[in-house]
Image (cartoon, rainbow, N blue to C red):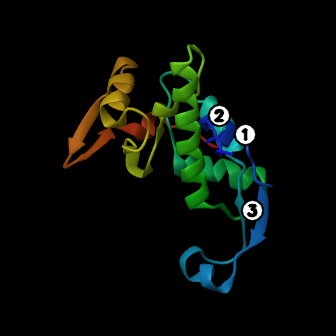
Amino acid sequence: MAHKKKTWREKLHDSKGHPTVSEVTDNMSKRWGEGTFVIPAPIEVDEIMKTVRKGRLITIDVIREILARKHETDFACPMTTGIFAWIAAHAADEAERDGKKRITPYWRTLKAKGELNPKYPGGLDNLRQRLESEGFEITQKGKRLLVDDFERYLVKPN
């Protein structure tokens, strides 16, 4: 029997037992320091991304800060947080292609330093067009696209 590939929305709702809080181990401490960290559930990342209103922006680092505070840890795993934001973006794109009007505004979630994420659906052209239509100005630096003065528009972790 053929294995049916999961949709992006199914992946978004498959928490695989997360969130989980762990102690930083020896191997990790060189890179991340001491303390505890959280591996979030994909849906938690999506829920934060959903709160970013038109005219505002968020970065993966701010999402990580919100998750760390929520779970009372020193930090949130950068790798899984980034992957789960990518899954949320693709799930939103999938929903939009199915005719949904209200989707997670993934184009408002930036990488560090205000950089657009080329791995999001539609690539840089799609993100640039959506952000410019909301009034943001985009600058190209090499192959990278950055939102001008992005810090002014950042959602603050509470």
Mark-to-mark CA distance, 3 and 2? 28 Å
Q: For the residue marked with disc 3, what is the amino acid?
A: Thr
* In the displayed structure image, the side of residue 57 where residue 42 appears, left or right: right
Residue wearing tag 2: 9
Q: Earlier in the sequence, mark 3 or mark 2?
A: 2
Residue 18 relative to residue 140: left or right: right
Query: Would residue 155 be seen by someone viewing this image from the given angle?
Result: no
Q: Between residue 6 and residue 143, name the one nearer to us.
A: 6
Q: CA distance from mark 1 to mark 3?
A: 23 Å
Q: Residue furthest front?
A: 1
Residues packed near mark 2 inside 10 Å, few (<14), some (14 to 19) or many (20 plus):
some
Q: Few, some or many C-alpha atoms within 10 Å of disc 1 (few <14, some 14-19, many ≥20)?
A: some
Which residue is nearer to you in this view: 149 or 75? 75
Residue type highlighted by circle 2:
Arg
Dot 3: few (<14), some (14–19), or many (≥20) neighbours within 10 Å?
A: some
- Label 3 vs label 2, nearer the camera: 2
Q: Secondary structure at mark 2?
A: helix
User: Where does label 3 land, which residue?
Assistant: 73
Residues under numbered marks 3 and 2 in contact, where contact means CB atoms less than 8 Å apart = no
Q: Identify the residue at image location x=60%, y=37%.
A: 8
- Image position, residue 100 (x, y; %): 59, 15
- For the C terminus, the image quarter is top right
Residue beneath the point at 70% across and 59% down = 39
Residue type for callout 1 = His
Circle 1 sits on which residue? 13
User: Hey, which residue is sitting farthest bottom in the picture?
Assistant: 26
